[in-house]
Structure formats: structure tokens, C-alpha cells
Image (cartoon, rainbow, N blue to C red):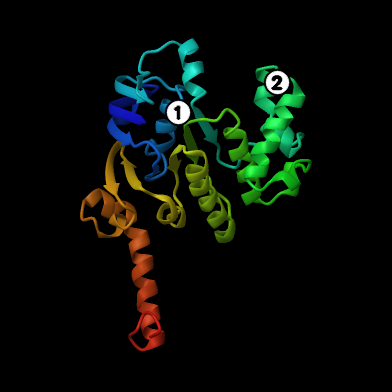
Amino acid sequence: MIIFKDVSVSFSGQRVLRGVSLHVKSGSITTIVGPSGSGKSTILRVAMGFRTVDSGSVAIDGEDVTSISEKRWTRVRRKMGMVFQHSALFDSLSVVENVGFYPYYVDRLPWRKVREQAMELLSELGLAESANKMPEELSGGMQRRVALARALVYHPKILLYDEPTTGLDPQNSDLVSNMIREANEKFGVTSVVVTHDLQCIHALSDEVVLITGGEGFSIGKPHQLFVATDPRVVDFTQVWRKQMLDYASEMRGETGGAVLPS
């Protein structure tokens, strides 16, 4: 569904991605992890055609998009939806107006038709009762759900999420993770999620890809983050590993050696 082969990208002469290869399979949820500034969000920009590559190739849904025109990209982007960090909703528009914004203002479709389509999406996502609310009236988790509805308005094959749980408490983070999984199952999409959220990684991932130092490689299933011996994985996960060891040690101390009650 999304294939990068030896993709390299530079900004102002500085190499950001160094020969990254990845294969996102149709219907899967792939999480991309890595240190800040490692190039994770750049992968999303390349996939959306907002950043050209210095070398390598990119294919979206079986089509080589490495050197296509902007006009052709406009068509390819219709296959994809993007859910931004912090939702990026229009504060002055209601929920239903946010969802129908692009079909109405960009495609110039009649509002009656756009509103009907938007309300169908909101109903499927359990948001119909919030259609006339303003974004500020919703929780962070509900705002992310509205952002998802807006991303689904063109019935994309691929959904891209940039740090979808940033700033959310554990409960809302869990709601967003469930939302992403639900979207994959209900709408048959393929998802790529850039995240630092360990809870999100474990709840969602069919495959985890680590980007570090501009280089990328597949780790596999989420548990591989904690058993892999590759120095790059160990270095990235050392804080998480220490927290888990400290927690296990504390639990053993409090329970007389048993981590879980019998």
C-alpha cells in the first residue's frame, strides 16, 4: 500500500532521511517511532507529496509517485486522509461544518449534500449528537474523533496520523487508540501512526518501524521493543525498559516476590 525504497531527503543541505525503506501492508496499522527530530513526520510529508525525495522511490497504492506532477498528486492525495497533532479543527466552525469544510469550500458542492455526507460519518463515529457543538465544547479525545471524520470525508484508502495522542490523558489516549483501530476495521483503511505513546504503540501496532538518525528499520511486533538486542532499539527504549524494571521491582517488594496476585 505504501512502499519506500532507499528514500533520502534533505532540508537546507542537511540529510534528514538516509536511505529509508519500509513497506506498509494493505489493511495494517504501522506505527513509526523514534527520537524527536529523527525524521518520523518527514515520512508522512513524503507520503502525502508535500516533500520531494533526493533519491529512492515512493509508491502509493501500487503507483510510483516519486516524480509525478502536482496535478497528479492532487488525485493521489484523495486516496489519503491526515489526522494532525492537536486535531487542527477550525475553532469558528461547528463539528459538522468542520467535517464538511473541504467538500463545501474547496470542491464547491451544495451544502445540503455535504451536510448529509458529514452527518453519515458523524453517526458512524458516534458523534451525531455533537454535530452542532463547537470544538471548544469537546474533550481532546472527541476532537480527535472529529478530525478523523474530516479525514474520512473523501473515503480514503490510507489514513496518516501525526502524534494523535499528544496532550491527552491516559483515558482519552485509550479512546483515540480504539478510534484508530475501529477506523481500520469499519472503513477498511490502512493506517500509519507516528507516535511516542507506548500505550498507543501496544494497543495498535501490527508492525513497529523505528526511525533514528534518519535511518529506518522494522522492529516487528510491539513486544520486540523490549526484547530486541539491536543497540539502536536498546538506546531508544532504555527509559521505557528502566521504568518497567523499576515497576516490577516495586511490585515484587510490595507483594513479597509475586508481581501479580495469585
Residue 28 at least partly seen: yes
Q: Earlier in the sequence, mark 2 or mark 1?
A: 1
Q: Residue under circle 2?
A: 105
Q: Secondary structure at mark 2?
A: helix
Residue 163 at least partly seen: no
| Residue kind at label 1, given as amino acid type | Arg
**Is residue 7 left or right of 39 when viewed as pictured?**
left
**Is residue 176 left or right of 45 when viewed as pictured?**
right
Q: Is residue 66 above or below residue 141?
A: above
Of residues 24 and 143, the one nearer the viewer is: 24
Q: Residue under circle 1?
A: 45
> Mark 2: few, some, or many residues within 10 Å (few <14, many ≥20)?
few
Q: Is residue 234 above or below residue 94?
A: below
Whole-percent x and y of residue 112? 77, 26
Whole-percent x and y of residue 217? 27, 41
The numbered disc on residue 82 is none
Q: Which residue does the image show at 27% across and 55% down from the upper left? A: 234
Whole-percent x and y of residue 251? 40, 80
How far is mark 2 from mark 1, CA to CA?
A: 23 Å
Q: Is residue 49 above or below residue 214?
A: above
When asked about the image quadrant of residue 214, the answer is top left
